Image: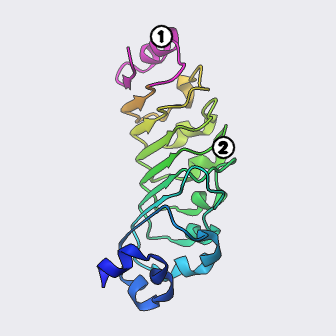
Amino acid sequence: MLNQLKFKSECLFEEVSTAKGIIKLSIRFPEYDLEKYGSSFLNFEKLKYLFLQSDVNSRSLISNDVGELKTLRHLEILNFNYKEFPEWILKLSNLEQLVFRGNDIVSLPDSISRLTKLKSFRIENCGIKKLPESMFKMNQLIHLSLADNFNIESIDSNCLPVNLKELIVTPSNLSFKQKEIILKKRPNLKVIDCD
């Protein structure tokens, strides 16, 4: 049955009993609008890992109901063309890993610090210009990737979480001088770049 569902993931939204036991769900290039399934996402009562990838030309968005999945620990959202960071993600209080790649957002909300259990955050290939000051409150965050964010020209080290161990800034327009400033203030931080 799993092989059949793999080829037609819409069945997952129709088979409530099947959805209840699923822990890991990956939907790539859906030929249907995920938003229309809305509350059907709530049938995934045990879901811990969710991977959603859209075609770069798609205008489809993800249902706000995904924000009600309190069991979710790992979320990946690729190429959904969001213009603003989705508020529903901030409701995922148990989230530990977040990958948000290939979206058109230029900033993160100050309320990003509500994701208090987040350990790894990859915000890549977006239009991010700077980090919000509130990020320093994210005490659990140890890995931050800003790869392929070419609008970032500086990072205020005061915004970086105190327990951050690794910062990926490759490739970006962050100057060598900026990287030196970060390393001077945060000598134990591993900064990965092209240089």
Q: Amino acid at mark 2?
A: Asp
Instruction: Point out the frontmost of discs 2 and 1.
Output: 1
In-front residue for pair 160/154: 154
Q: Is residue 176 left or right of residue 150?
A: left
Residue denoted by label 2: 110
- Tell me residue 165's x, y (percent): 36, 32
Q: Is residue 36 above or below residue 118?
A: below
Whether residue 60 is visible here, answered yes or no, is: yes
- Asked if residue 31 lies in the magenta stretch, the reply is no
Q: Quadrant location of the C terminus? A: top left
- Tell me residue 59's x, y (percent): 66, 57
In-front residue for pair 179/38: 38
Residue under the point 46% across and 42% down: 122
Whether residue 140 is visible here, answered yes or no, is: no
Tag 2 secondary structure: helix
Tag 1 secondary structure: helix
- Which region of the structure is painted magenta? 171-195
- Asked if residue 179 lies in the magenta stretch, the reply is yes
Q: Is residue 176 above or below residue 9?
A: above
Q: Residue furthest right?
A: 83
Mark 2 to mark 1: distance in Å?
Answer: 27 Å
Q: Earlier in the sequence, mark 2 or mark 1?
A: 2
- Tell me residue 124's x, y (percent): 50, 39
Q: Is residue 105 above or below residue 114?
A: above
In-front residue for pair 29/87: 29
Residue under the point 62% across and 30% down: 130
Residue under the point 66% across and 45% down: 109
Residue denoted by label 1: 176
Q: Amino acid at mark 1?
A: Phe
Residue under the point 64% across and 61% down: 60
